[in-house]
Amino acid sequence: MDLDIKGRWALVCAASKGLGKGCATALASEGVNVVITARGRDALDATAQELRQANPDAQIIAVAGDITTSEGRAQALAAAPHFDILVNNAGGPPPGDFRTWSREDWIAALDANMLTAIELIKATIDGMTERGFGRIVNITSGAVKAPIDVLGLSNGARSGLTGFIAGVARQKRIAERNVTVNNMLPGLFETDRLRQSTDAAAKAQGKSYDVALEAKRQAIPAGRFGTADEFGAFCAFLCSAKAGYLTGQNILLDGGAYPGTF
Ligand code: NAP
C-alpha cells in the first residue's frame, strides 16, 4: 500500500533509539523527510546516517537537544520549513514510591510526558490546518489504560496528555481540515527502556535479570515483546494519507496483555 506521504516533513522526537527510531525509520522508508532529535549526539548521528543510507531520496536532519526544554524544542522546530507530521516522544519517568516524589519530580514528569507534547502541538497544528493536512501521534503508554503501580509519574502525566488530546482532536476546525491527533500506547517493547525497567524490577525483587524478563514475557499472550519496527509501521500508517478518518483514538499495541474487552 502506498501511504501517500512521500515528500512530507515529519518531526520525530526522541528518535535515536527505540520506539522513536522505529517511527522515524518507517516514515523515512515512505519517502518522508524526517527531523529526528535526541540528547546524545553519537547515537543520534549514527541513526541519521543509517536512515540516509537506506533512503537516499529523503532528507534526514538530526537535531541534538533535550526536547523537554524550550531551547530543545525551538531548535527542532527550526530545522524544517514546516511540519506535516509530528510524533511526540520523550524518555519515560523513573519508577518509585509516590511518597518520595517531590513537586520537582512531578514537574519534570509533566514536562517530559505532557507539556512538551502540548507545546509542540501548539507550534505546528495551525500550519497543518492551513495546509489541509496534518498527522500528530503521541507515544504514551499502556499504563494510561492499565496503570503500573511503580510508574505513578508516568500514569499521571500521560493521563493528563490523553485527556487534553481527546478534546483537541475533536475540535471541528482541526478535524475538518484533515488534521488527526492520536495516541499510541505501547505495551512491552524490546528497547533500552524495557531493559532498564526490568533491571530495576529485578534488583527490587531480588531476582536475576533473566528471571524478571521471562516473567514479563510470560504475561504477554503473544508470548513475546514487541519490536520497534512493528511499532514504527503502525505509526507510519497513522501518519498516512489513508488514515484521515481516524482521530482522537488511543491505540494499544501490547500483544494482548491488556485483559479487558474494551
Ligand atoms: P528508549 O529505547 O530508551 O529510547 C529513548 C529515546 O528517547 C532515545 O533516543 C533517547 O536518546 C531519547 N530521549 C530520551 N529523553 C529525551 C529528551 N529529553 N529529549 C530528547 N530525546 C530524548 O525508550 P523507548 O522504549 O523507545 O520508549 C519511548 C517512550 O515510550 C518512553 O516515554 C517510554 O517510557 C515509553 N514506553 C515504552 C515502553 C517499552 O516497552 N519500551 C512501554 C511503555 C511506554 P537520548 O537519551 O540520547 O536523549
Image (cartoon, rainbow, N blue to C red):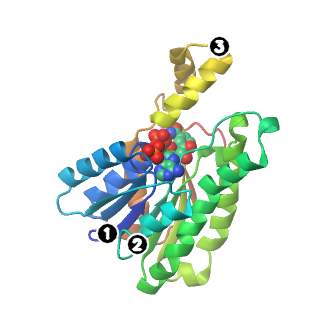
**Which residue: 58% across, 68% down?**
119
Mark sitting on residue 206: 3
Is 253 above or below relative to 206?
A: below
What residue is at 54 percent from the left and 78 percent from the top? 175
Residue at label 1? 5
Sequence-first tag of 3 and 1: 1
- Disc 1 on helix, strand or loop? loop
- Indicate the amino acid at tag 2: Phe
Q: Which element type, helix, strand or loop, lies under badge 2? A: loop
Horizontal and vertical percent for residue 5?
31, 69
> Please, what is the three-letter code of the amino acid marked with disc 1?
Ile
Q: Is residue 254 visible?
A: no
- Mark 2 or mark 1, which has the lower sequence index? 1
Q: Is residue 45 above or below residue 94?
A: below
Q: CA distance from mark 3 to mark 1?
A: 49 Å
Q: Residue at x 56, y 13 (%)?
A: 208
